[in-house]
Amino acid sequence: MDWVPFQRPRLPPADRVERYFALARDAHWFSNEGPCVRLLGDRLAAYVGGSLHCTTVSSGTLGLMVALRAALGQDGERREVIVPSFTYIASVSAILWAGLVPAFMDVARDHWHLDPGLLAEALAERGDRVAGVLACSTFGCAPPSRVTAAWEQACRRYEVPLIVDSAAGFGSLDDRNRPLGGQGVAEVFSFHATKPFAIGEGGAVFAADEALSERIGRQTKFGLDARRALVDAPGLNAKMSEIHAATALAALDDFKEVLAAREQRSEALREGLVEHGFEFQAGCESSAWQFIPALASSAAVRDEALDLARSARVELRTYHEPLHAMRALSRYEALDDLAVTRDLAERMLSMPLANDLSDIEISRIRAVLTRA
């Protein structure tokens, strides 16, 4: 019996990538914002819509790093960045690499995103210590628009920038049918091979403010401006290469079909599982679906499903291990008891998803969960 892997990444065919890469080859321009990168930035901005500016980057993590430096800086006594503990390590890695300090906060039970009520309370109590907020679109699912509005209102009131890590969220829609991309002062996406919009490595940062977008762009180029004068030090080499941009352009051509395929397979996997005691994230129906997170009725049911999956040669995973509980991060402060984070982490079970997941594979995955 074949193994059903947790993810089975698929990139665009080489011939379709080559059609775009020819632009770079003909120009003998393979990095430093060549023709593919410029075209991709325009197309990504058009896809997201609005008046947003797009900066492509060589990874989503580097996108977070340059966005944090550009929006928050590194001067002054405000050092803390409020971030959910229930997220991937890249969020906190970026905070630390930017020379800032994470302060862990809980997520809300009804949608699994940063709790806006707790955020408002924390900013009221310690606003003079907070440099910014790094919220997350958990699992790439768009937060309810009321939640995003509450984040932004609290951050405006206490004059701290809001950055949103939407790593797996490119292609997800919010409850107003709008693509993610316009949350906070900057929103960051990953185009890693395991993401729904997969190009191998890469990402993008969107910002509404042109001056901020220009600072973000300079941060990706060592802090140099268009005249190659150093104006934002220290910067990074976070530029996207032309070959990755060509891959992204080819991926964008059929991204609508990819999203439809993932939606169809996610519906088939989730069908009837609520009756078996599993819960799904609020708003997940319009997610781009990197994988399918489900909340088991208890930790025992989750563990039983993991055991059954191994016997059935199906790879299930958990996600996320609370960051505040990691030994390497334990010295950083938790701003509340993180009870929801701990509960979700103990019961979360993530199902495989792929563009080409077969009906037989779907049946095998479902059988594991219904038996558990």
Image: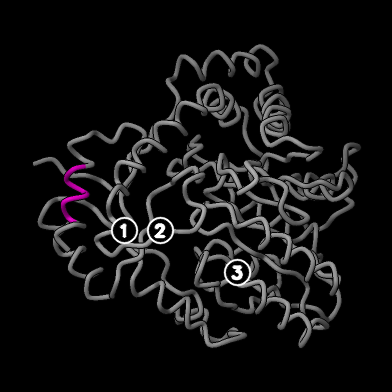
Q: Quadrant of the N terminus?
A: top left
Residue 346: give x, y in percent of width and height: 34, 75
Q: Nearer the viewer, mark 2 or mark 3?
A: 2
Q: Is residue 71 above or below residue 302?
A: above
Give yes or no for residue 64 being in the magenta stretch: no
Q: Is residue 147 above or below residue 1?
A: below
Q: Which residue is mark 2?
A: 280
Q: Nearer the viewer, residue 235 or 274?
A: 274
Q: Give the numbered dot on residue 40.
A: none
Relative horizontal placement of residue 279, taking residue 87 as reference (left or right): left
Q: Nearer the viewer, residue 75 or 251?
A: 251
Relative horizontal placement of residue 34, taking residue 17 as reference (left or right): right
Q: Quadrant of residue 155?
A: bottom right
Most distant residue in the front direction = 275
Q: State which region is magenta.
A: 363-368
Q: Residues within 10 Å of mark 2 (few under 14, many from 20)?
A: some
Residues tagged 1 and 2 counted as in contact (Cβ below 8 A): yes
Q: Earlier in the sequence, mark 1 or mark 2?
A: 1
Q: Nearer the viewer, residue 14 or 351?
A: 351
Q: Nearer the viewer, mark 1 or mark 2?
A: 1
Residue 241: give x, y in percent of width and height: 62, 33
Label count reads 3
The local secondary structure at tag 3 comes to loop
Q: Which residue is mark 1?
A: 274
* Cα distance in 3D space between marks 2 and 3: 17 Å
Q: Which residue is mark 3?
A: 114
Identify the residue at horizontal 44%, vertical 45% (top origin). 289
- Amino acid under label 3? Leu
Q: Residues within 10 Å of mark 3 (few under 14, many from 20)?
A: many
